[in-house]
Amino acid sequence: MELNWTLFGQWITFFLLLFLLTKFLYTPLSKVMQSRTAKIQEGLDAAEKARHDLAEAKAFYETQQVTAKTEAQEIIKNAQQRAVALKEEIVSQAKEESNRVVQKAREDVQLEWEKARMELKREMADIIFIATGKIIGEVIDRDRHMALVTDVVKNVKANGV
């Protein structure tokens, strides 16, 4: 077998070139590519995390919105209930005040009625006293006069006058 030095030189050149390309080109290029791949992966992870955070924030916002809406409805409901209760209380107080005023007016009317009756009785007694004195033609003392007045009042009540 004959050794071909040209082929052997080509093999040595090929392996030397392969070694040099691997050492100075492929390895740094591979490291750059890995670094770039890592950065892209970090960007994708950050984007995924941001998407996840956004979804959480959106869910939190929606939950807060529902909670706020529920609380607002509860506040409105409580305010309406308080307004109705206050209205009922005011109406009740107004009715009580109206009843007190009416009762006071009735009492005042009754008091005035009693005063007028007493005044009428007194005037009637004076008229009867004077008339009796003129009819009988003599002076009547106070006791006899009271007995006559009482008798007349009884007759008036009995006859409905």
Image: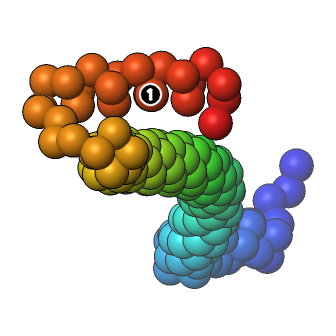
The answer to whether residue 97 is left or right of residue 15 is left
Q: Give the percent coordinates (x, y) of residue 9.
A: 70, 74
Q: In the displayed structure, would residue 155 be above or below residue 106?
A: above
Look at 74% across and 67% down and name the residue there.
11
Do we see residue 155 in this rendering? Answer: yes
Q: Secondary structure at mark 1?
A: helix
Look at 21% across and 41% down and name the residue there.
138
Q: Nearer the viewer, residue 122 or 129?
A: 129
Q: In the displayed structure, would residue 15 be above or below residue 28?
A: above
Q: Give the percent coordinates (x, y) of residue 32.
A: 54, 77
Q: In the displayed structure, would residue 13 be above or below residue 110?
A: below
Residue beneath disc 1: 153
The answer to whether residue 57 is left or right of residue 134 is right
Look at 12% across and 32% down and name the residue there.
142
Q: Nearer the viewer, residue 141 or 156?
A: 141
Q: Give the percent coordinates (x, y) of residue 129.
A: 28, 44
Q: Give the percent coordinates (x, y) of residue 38.
A: 55, 64
